Image (cartoon, rainbow, N blue to C red):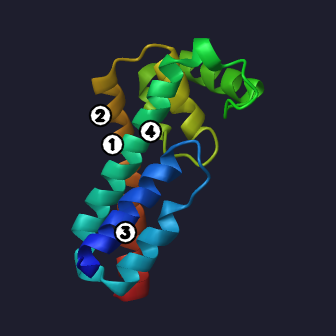
């Protein structure tokens, strides 16, 4: 397998996991790859954005199932965190999904969106916009500061 496939596949996995309930930092992987191969920034941005957005879709599915499992000890979102994000979501609605990239509350927000029956297409579009914008800023900063 080529280095290109391995690096991009690893970034996809890191971005996917970082958006789910697993604690992971995709930004470090992205920055490392950008420093190593700055000319690959367009594909790295795309792969990170798609992986992170699809990881959030897993949270959306978890949200759809929340009524069945939310009282289980293993459920990844604490009740107080869920209630806080639910209030945020009720106040700002579907547009709050533009902030699903936030390190604190972003993952819970995507779970709440599923629980509150947000349609999948608007969910994916808004989450993708926010997450891609976050990665784009990181790409621009890395390529400009560390590489340029």
Q: Residue at x 74, y 24 (%)?
A: 79
Q: Which residue is mark 1?
A: 129
Q: Which residue is mark 3?
A: 139
Q: What is the spatial separation of the Cα atoms under label 2 and label 1, in whole angstroms? A: 6 Å
- Pick the quarter of the image with the N terminus: bottom left
Image check: 59 left or right of 53? right
Q: Quadrant of residue 117?
A: top left
Q: Quadrant of residue 72?
A: top right
Q: Quadrant of residue 53?
A: top left
Q: Which mark is residue 125?
A: 2
Image check: 129 left or right of 28? left
Number of the front mark, 1 or 4: 4
Specify whether residue 96 is in view: no
Residue 57 image offset from top left, x and y in percent: 40, 34
Per the image, label 2 sits on a secondary structure element best described as: helix
Q: Residue at x 44, y 35 (%)?
A: 58
Q: Which residue is mark 4?
A: 56
Q: Please tell me whether residue 3 is drawn above or below residue 139 in the rendered image.
A: below
Residue 82 image offset from top left, x and y in percent: 67, 25
Specify whether residue 89 is in view: yes
Q: Are marks 2 and 1 in contact (CB under 8 Å)?
A: yes
Residue 148 image offset from top left, x and y in percent: 34, 87
Per the image, label 1 sits on a secondary structure element best described as: helix
């Amino acid at each position: 397998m080529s280095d290109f496939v391995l690096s991009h596949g690893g970034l996809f996995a890191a971005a996917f996991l970082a958006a789910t309930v697993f604690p992971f930092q995709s930004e470090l992987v992205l920055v490392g790859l950008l420093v190593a191969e700055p000319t690959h920034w367009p594909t790295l941005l795309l792969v990170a954005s798609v992986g992170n957005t699809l990881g959030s879709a897993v949270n959306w599915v978890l949200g759809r199932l929340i009524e069945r499992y939310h009282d289980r000890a293993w459920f990844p979102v604490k009740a107080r965190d869920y209630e806080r994000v639910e209030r945020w979501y009720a106040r700002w609605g579907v547009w709050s999904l533009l902030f699903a990239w936030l390190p604190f509350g972003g993952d819970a927000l995507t779970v709440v969106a599923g629980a509150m029956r947000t349609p999948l297409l608007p969910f994916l579009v808004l989450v993708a916009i926010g997450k891609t914008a976050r990665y784009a800023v990181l790409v621009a900063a890395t390529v400009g500061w560390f590489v340029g």
